[in-house]
Image: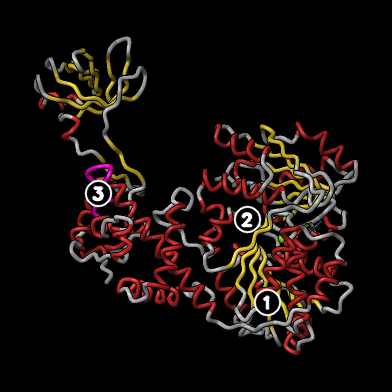
Amino acid sequence: MEYELKVLKINDNKIKQLNELSLYTVKDLILHYPYRYEEMLETPLHDETKVIIEGKLIDEPKVFFKGRLSRLTFHIDYHGETLTITLFNRHFLKKNMHVGMKLTIVGKYNEARKSITASEVKLKGLEEISGITPVYSLKEGLTQKNFQGYVNKALSFYKGHIGNSIPDYLCQKYHLVDRQEALFKVHQPQTRSDVISALRYLKYEEFFKFQMTMQYIKQNRTQNIGISKLIDKEQINKFIQKLPFQLTEDQQKVVDDILIDLSSQKLMYRFVQGDVGSGKTVVAAISLYANYLAGYQGAMMAPTEILALQHYQSLKKLFKKTKVNIALLTGHLSLKEKNEIYQQLEQGKIDIIVGTHALFQDKVQYNQLGLVITDEQHRFGVEQRKALKNKGNKVDFLVMTATPIPRTLAISLYGDMDVSTIKTMPNGRKKVITRFVKGISMKPILKDLKDYLASGGQCYVVCPLVSESEAIEGRNASDISKAMASYFKGQYEVGLVHGQMNDEEKNQVMDAFKENKIQVLVSTTVIEVGVDVSNANMMVIYNAERFGLSQLHQLRGRVGRSKEQGYCYLLSQANNSEQKERLEFLENHHDGFEVSEYDLKIRGPGDLLGQKQSGVPTFMIGDIFKDYHILEITRKDAYEALNQHQDDEKIQKMLVEIKNNLTKNNAYID
Ligand code: ADP
Ligand code: MG
């Protein structure tokens, strides 16, 4: 049962403010956990640091006024030593102070003067002060005290009705408190250990539910019998041998995994992660080819038109010597062209279709769809993937992403899929030379840029903004492109591409860049994923501090994609040491897995995975990095629960809830 906040007799004005925090029900209040705790613990006396100590008042406090400002001074006995305490603007405390009482002082200690400038004086000894106070993230208008009051009301409202959702055998195994106790302790802790035991339960519960969902989906899927495709090993090997390069060890391994999946009765649901430039496209091509040889159509879906076009071109090249009929379906084809493609798809004349979400409109019908590949999956809506998959009843599914994360974490997070990883880079690939340049001016690198252009190369210039913004500071692509165009006038062509242009315009510029009609391409992050122009091996990124590390790594992955040396300049004013450290990290690290791990550590998973799009839930309380071991344990426990404890009442209840949620959110493909 959900109860609205009204039942707690909170006034309408405050309810509005709570709504702004997306809190609408009593349950929402209880699930709005503190984001940190404040604790009063005695500290030693260190010069010029914040200290918390207890002492005995040894004289009458004195009050001085200066205008409306006041100063209260008194002395305390601290382990036999006399300390002078000064407190501003709280003279009213004097009336409740009497010689001999215990006081708790918070403030800055000065060794030479034996004095403390206090920020807080409590008229109690340390042990009487309740140890630990939750701190919530709130918006204007709500105080911590308000909020604590509401949460207390909410907890009393539900008291006695909060049941456990974790089965007893697991609670016993891990010595978990029960759910009600956890919720009370997370909001009303008496001690630090209350907080710890509450968080242990809540994190376990959150991850366990997540893993149960993953396992449930996976088990249901394996019950989905797919088509055992006939794999023409000979033809496939011939195709691989004719490639202009030799597959890397990891590429070959992933191809083997995929071929086994395709030939098996089970539906494939595989997640391939590989660093930028690791060569995922050719893996996709081989999979599509195997699927084609088995007699099925394949679809490859990209998140943008630019990428779709590029995949189409790469695949076309790779399939040149085969009979594969490959087509591109994009939004800007004429109606006539589109209709032709629809018809040919339905008749089975097209073997492989490449496109964006245009691939799964209702109008598009396939003759024998057997394999769907999505590239850069985390940018695709789950809905869209589902729609495409519904185009065929037994379609194998391959998901590719260039945001690599540590393999074990991937398995935990994408627990409903099989995970393959491409770690090795193609032979002869050089590390992109990355330099952090302080400032936001091109001057320090202008000579490098000019030399590079003079040698016949092309350059990307990336800006955080499209056009000038009052709200956000940073270089914008429009102004930079104008400035560069006038600087290089008569010498080099400068192009501009950004997300506010329509696809037609974008494609035109990209094509011109590919054909080297444009030498300097100024852009926003639209070129972030996938774009592959082998003659462009220099990149300048303005305001690099404004991007996530994984994003910067993606960006620089656009250069140095062949045997050529790539260069990436990170221009940044980076005025704090954390920003500087991050950029310097990129100077010295070139492995996407390391970069993502570092990013994960300092920024959390949100930025990394683009969670909202990826279908990976945002965890409310668990931290996939810090609490990684819980994530792992719950994966095993969920597996066991589903296989050995199906009859447990709580497991059954949880499964009902999971099924309902999945149906309600239409959230996963099964
Ligand atoms: P990504 O994994 O970033 O999508 P691509 O598939 O676009 O990477 O490959 C990047 C470049 O590397 C392409 O130009 C491709 O032709 C080349 N490539 C892929 N595999 C190999 C290999 N085994 N050896 C040499 N070059 C390769
Ligand atoms: Mg790619």
Residue 117 part of the magenta segment: no
Q: Quadrant of residue 14?
A: bottom left
Say which mark, if any, is on residue 403. Answer: 2
- Residue 74 visible in image: no
Q: Estimate the x, y position of residue 313 in percent, counting from the top left.
A: 81, 67
How far apart marks 3 and 1 lie (CA) works out to: 59 Å
Q: Nearer the viewer, mark 1 or mark 2?
A: 1
Residue behind mark 3: 146
Q: Residue at x 71, y 88 (%)?
A: 367
Q: 108 left or right of 380? A: left
Crowding at label 1, few (<14), some or many (≥20) Cα neighbours within 10 Å?
Answer: many
Residue 233 in the image: above or below residue 604? below
* Mark 2: amino acid: Thr
Q: Estimate the x, y position of residue 634 in percent, counting from the top left.
A: 42, 60
Residue behind mark 1: 262
Q: Nearer the viewer, mark 3 or mark 1?
A: 1
Crowding at label 3, few (<14), some or many (≥20) Cα neighbours within 10 Å?
Answer: few
* Mark 1: amino acid: Leu
Q: Residue at x 63, y 55 (%)?
A: 403
Depth check: 245 or 151 in front?
A: 245
- Residue 118 visible in image: yes
Whether ligand 1 has any atom under 8 Å from the Cβ at mark 2 is answered as no
How far apart marks 1 and 2 lie (CA) works out to: 25 Å
